[in-house]
Image: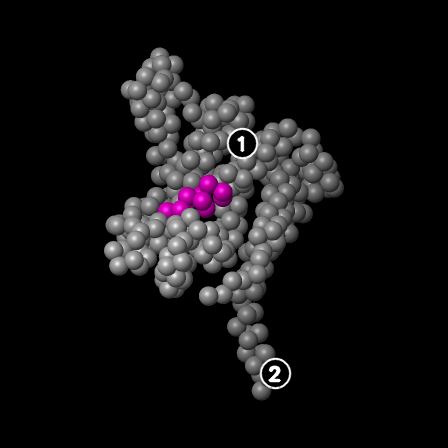
């Protein structure tokens, strides 16, 4: 019976595992193989160059700057998104107080959930178009137009939000955070709804205020969900290709601007692969991106690991 059971399970697993190996694992292996060559992408004739591409990467100022930009996204995007989503989720689920002394969300919490989640249904292309209209570098842009109206910006010299070295990364972060907060708000709200209200009511009877309820009850019981959100947001921060290439496309091939102020690893990789024809070099960048993402995921899971709290 047991041998028959193993054959039965293996029979069901064989095809999915085969498809995974062919369409996921094998392309990774191919990418690593091409990264050791001078492949130009136009033909299958290439020469083996060993680790020369990887040595060149660490002498490439553009790529090293792009890594630094990704690291800045990695620090600020998860932190700000999770903090905002936790705050809004707590207010919508346990931030209000009923007249009977119980625990409930603020008035209109169901409506607010829909409003906050709405940006999540927008595609990245629509998001890029929307924020390009906000950041337009003339008086017709929403942000410049508002600042001109309140006399904080000279109408003859509007701010070029997507071309200012000290501003462009923050402008991109705002777009990502604006879209992502709603999704993680719903995620955290679903996790909060599984927490018995009796715990909050007992804390309320003991004299706990909102801050104490959040830090002593809500956050410890949501830690597993926060950990998962951190990993997903970290992966988003390590990519950023679509927004950078869409919102800064007029300032350089595949985004990044003429001075590479907003370049990320993905835009540098695609520029080398499609624009410069340095496909083997670009494959080496892809391998580095994969390794950094894996290291990030493992590090985050290890650092944020803690004993599971039951209720």
Could you say whether the residue bearing mark 2 is in a helix, strand or loop? helix
Instruction: Answer with the quarter of the image where residue 25 lies.
Output: bottom right
Relative to 7, 145 lies left or right: left
In the image, farthest residue toward the front: 206
Which mark is on residue 263? 1
138, above or below 28, in the image: above
Could you say whether the residue bearing mark 1 is in a helix, strand or loop? loop
Q: Quadrant of the N terminus?
A: bottom right
Figure colour scheme: one colour
Residue 113 position within the rendered picture, expressed as x and y whole percent measured from the top left: 31, 50
| Residue shown at the point (39%, 42%) measured from the top left | 179
| Residue shown at the point (26%, 50%) measured from the top left | 107
- For discs 1 and 2, the disc positioned in front in the rendered view: 1
* Near-viewer residue (149 or 11): 149
* Near-viewer residue (249 or 132): 132
Which secondary structure is most common in the magenta stretch? helix
Residue range corresponding to the magenta coloring: 78-88
Q: From this viewpoint, is residue 296 visible?
A: yes
- Circles 1, 2 touching at the beta carbon (< 8 Å): no
| Residue shown at the point (28%, 53%) measured from the top left | 110
Q: Earlier in the sequence, mark 1 or mark 2?
A: 2
Q: From this viewpoint, is residue 22 visible?
A: no
261, above or below 124, in the image: above
Q: CA distance from mark 1 to mark 2?
A: 55 Å
| Residue shown at the point (49%, 44%) measured from the top left | 78
* Near-viewer residue (155 or 188): 188
Residue 128 position within the rendered picture, expressed as x and y whole percent measured from the top left: 39, 35
Q: Residues within 10 Å of mark 1 (few under 14, many from 20)?
A: many
**What residue is pinned by disc 2?**
3
Residue 143 position within the rendered picture, expressed as x and y whole percent measured from the top left: 34, 26
**Residue 84 belongs to magenta span:** yes
């Amino acid at each position: 019976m047991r041998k028959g059971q193993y054959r039965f399970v293996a029979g069901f697993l064989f095809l999915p595992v085969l498809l995974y190996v062919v369409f996921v694992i094998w392309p990774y292996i191919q990418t690593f193989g091409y990264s050791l060559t001078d492949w130009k992408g136009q033909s299958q004739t290439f020469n083996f160059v060993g680790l020369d591409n990887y040595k060149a990467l660490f002498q490439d100022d553009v790529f090293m700057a792009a890594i630094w930009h990704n690291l800045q996204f990695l620090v600020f995007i998860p932190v700000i998104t999770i903090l905002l989503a936790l705050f809004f989720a707590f207010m919508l689920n346990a931030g209000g107080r009923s007249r009977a002394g119980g625990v409930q969300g603020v008035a209109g919490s169901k409506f607010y959930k829909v409003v906050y989640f709405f940006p999540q249904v927008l595609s990245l292309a629509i998001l890029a178009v929307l924020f390009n209209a906000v950041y337009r570098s003339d008086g017709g842009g929403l942000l410049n137009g508002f600042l001109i109206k309140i006399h904080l910006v000279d109408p003859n010299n509007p701010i070029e939000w997507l071309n200012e070295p000290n501003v462009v990364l923050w402008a991109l972060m705002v777009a990502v955070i604006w879209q992502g907060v709603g999704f993680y708000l719903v995620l955290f709200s679903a996790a909060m709804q599984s927490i018995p209200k009796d715990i909050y009511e007992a804390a309320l009877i003991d004299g706990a205020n909102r801050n104490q309820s959040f830090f002593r009850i809500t956050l410890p019981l949501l830690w597993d969900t926060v950990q998962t959100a951190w990993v997903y947001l970290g992966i988003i921060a390590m990519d950023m290709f679509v927004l950078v290439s869409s919102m800064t496309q007029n300032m350089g091939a595949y985004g990044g601007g003429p001075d590479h102020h907003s370049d990320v690893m993905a835009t540098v990789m695609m520029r080398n692969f499609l624009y410069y024809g340095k496909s083997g070099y670009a494959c080496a960048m892809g391998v580095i991106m994969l390794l950094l993402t894996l290291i990030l995921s493992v590090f985050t899971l290890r650092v944020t690991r803690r004993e599971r709290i039951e209720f």
